[in-house]
Image (cartoon, helix red, strand yellow):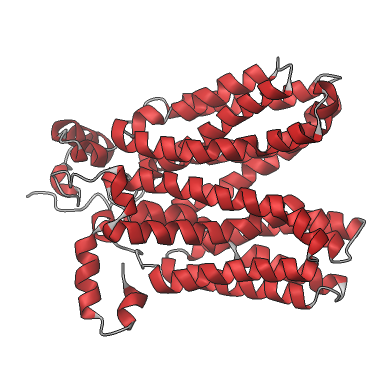
Amino acid sequence: MSNTVSVEDVPLNRFHRLLTVRSGGGSFVDGYVLSIIGIAMMKVSPALGLTAFWEGLIAASALIGIFFGGFIGGALTDRLGRRMLYFVGPTLFVVCSVAQYWVQSGEMLFALRFLNGVAVGIEYPVATAFLVEFLPKKNRGPCLATLTILWFAGAAAAYMIGEALLHFGGPDAWRLTLASTAVIGALLFLVRMGTPESPRWLISKGRHAEAEAIIRKVYGPDFGLDNLPEQAESKNLSFFNLLHSGYGKRMAFVTIFWTCSVIPVFAVYAFAPKVLDALHLSGKWASYGSVAITLLFVVGCIIATRLVNTLGRRKLLLQSFLWSGLALLLLGLLRDGPSMIILLMFGAYALFIGGAQVLQLVYPNEIFPTEIRAGAVGVGTSLSRIGAAVGTWLVPASLQSLGIGTTMYIAAAITFVGLAVSWWLAPETNARSLADAASLDDEASQKARVPGHMAKRHML
């Protein structure tokens, strides 16, 4: 009797768990890379004689690199395969981080940090596409959401390890701090060895025999191509399909909701002490508040990870934007209120925005087909980082010229834009196969079944 069980309905196995570690390790390194410079900069600046201009440029260098890395990584991952690009990020992490130990100028440090940012940008599309194309559908959301938690874990590790190295490492400890990423990058490279190519990508290129061999190896000898709910022939899609037709609308949704969810987060995360000081919280209140907000970002992501299947993607996203936007609005209204109220509203924002944060990697991986999946994640990564960089850059100027109240109102408005766009365009992909969730034909048929204006609310 033939096996008719879909590979998307099998229980989570050892391979799936190992692949989650392999892909999640990239998010951990990403958080570490982007945070370690903040720890080292106070020592780097006098050692290299940096001007304020170069300090700012070096601080932004990784974000600039992510912009280019997202586009490059997404396009190449769809063209050359997941496995080849899976090792580019760890290699760049090791080479560029080791080279930072001998850096002698701001220009050289900028170039190396830029390349590290390119590696981070590549990681987003390749690691998530790899993961989503192997996982059972009931585990896709939680496992992809876990990557966001691991990013915060990497950022926390950077703070702890960086502080320890600066304290015990001697006069050139900042060099060790910058180079420390190489150790994690090397471990990531080693743990990824032996990862097979994605069968879905192989099928999209017409390499059916190789795909079937990998399916049998991962899922067992009773499985084959018939157990993979994916079209056997390539849809002949290209990177440019992200810009038009039904996929153009989906790309607009991903880019806008992703950008609206990261601008206030990056601003709050980067300038928490400054923002709290503007809200009249100084000294220990500001220090404790910054730590508490960071921890609540993590807690919010953990809670959202548990809810991503039970609430569903669409409902979780809408609730996240609604309540976090209201928290920012209240921060503007109550800017002169008691310290505990201010901290409570900040904590509520950090907690509620977790839903939108974890869905940044879930949605683009589920609503685009194999041929352009990594490209969609890459474009979303790149364009959202423009907003994050601009928003972060404008926070100090906004606080000085517009005041804390108006700054919080602007942050709330950005969040509500994300809510409005999500209300209009966010699909529900929970418990659906990848082929089904990414199909434009299914979108058209479902829209036809929903009368009038309600179709927009339920479109996929």
Classify 381 as above or below 351: above
In the rendered image, residue 160, in percent from the top left (x then y), is placed at 75, 38
Q: Quadrant of residue 78?
A: top left
Residue at left offset 43%, top offset 47%: 379
Taking depth in this image into account, of 176 and 264 the one nearest to the observer is: 264
Residue at the location (19% across, 63% down)? 441
Q: Residue furthest bottom?
A: 452
Residue 204 versus residue 329: which sits nearer the camera?
A: 329
Q: Residue furthest right?
A: 283
**Is 458 placed above or below 20 here?**
below
Q: Quadrant of the C terminus?
A: bottom left
Quarter where residue 97 is shown? top right
- Please state the horizontal and vertical placement of residue 87, each as a whole percent of the image: 44, 27
State the image coordinates of residue 443 (x, y, percent, origin top left). Answer: 25, 67
Q: Nearer the viewer, residue 447 or 181?
A: 447
**Residue 284 in picture, x, y percent from top left:** 91, 56
Q: Is residue 90 above or below residue 34?
A: above
Left or right: where does residue 396 sit relative to residue 204? right
The foreground one among 418 and 144 is 418
Could you tell whether 89 is left or right of 292 in the image?
Answer: left
Looking at the image, which residue is at 69% across and 33% down?
58
Task: Identify which residue is drawn at 39% across, 53% down.
Answer: 364
